[in-house]
Image (cartoon, rainbow, N blue to C red):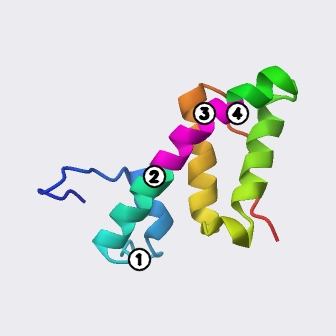
């Protein structure tokens, strides 16, 4: 999905968050693009926070990512569970950390 006006290309990994079992989008292309931009920005903003936690509190990379995922899975975050998982997976990629298995919060 690419928009000629703003040239934002939504990666397949994010498209999968909004695709049903038949491969069709569950939201409009504009909604998916807007949510992608939000999630990508959030992942980028969380890089510094994760690095600070790692150096100050010294928990493992895995624990930091799991805590951030748990926080993003709360209703207060306004993130869908699939978005929370995508954000933390993207964060791990940006940090060059191994992404742990992420379980959706109950």
Whether label 4 touches label 3, CB < 8 Å = yes
Quick check: can you spot residue 90?
no
Residue lying at the far left of the rendered structure: 4
Q: Nearer the viewer, residue 23 or 79?
A: 79
Residue 9 in the image: above or below residue 45: below
Residue 98 in the image: above or below residue 16: above
Who comes first in sequence, dot 2 or dot 3?
2
User: Which residue occupies 43% across, 63% down?
Assistant: 35
User: Pointer 1: what residue?
Assistant: 22
Mark 2 to mark 1: distance in Å?
A: 16 Å
Mark 4 to mark 3: distance in Å?
A: 5 Å
Q: Position of residue 51 (x, y in %)?
A: 69, 26
Residue lying at the far top of the rendered structure: 55
Who comes first in sequence, dot 4 or dot 1?
1
Q: Position of residue 41 (x, y in %)?
A: 47, 47
Q: Position of residue 60 (x, y in %)?
A: 84, 28
User: Pointer 2: what residue?
Assistant: 13
Whether label 2 touches label 4, CB < 8 Å = no
User: Pointer 4: what residue?
Assistant: 50
Residue 93: image quadrant is top right
Q: Is residue 2 left or right of residue 59?
A: left
């Amino acid at each position: 999905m690419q928009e000629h006006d703003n040239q934002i290309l939504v990666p397949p990994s994010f498209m999968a968050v909004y695709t049903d079992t038949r491969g069709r989008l569950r939201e409009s292309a504009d909604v998916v693009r807007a949510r992608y931009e939000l999630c990508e920005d959030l992942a980028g903003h969380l890089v510094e926070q994760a690095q600070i936690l790692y150096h100050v509190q010294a928990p493992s990379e895995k624990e930091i990512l799991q805590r951030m995922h748990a926080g993003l899975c709360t209703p207060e975050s306004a993130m869908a569970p699939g978005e929370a998982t995508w954000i933390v997976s993207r964060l791990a990629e940006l940090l060059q950390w191994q992404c742990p298995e992420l379980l959706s919060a109950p």
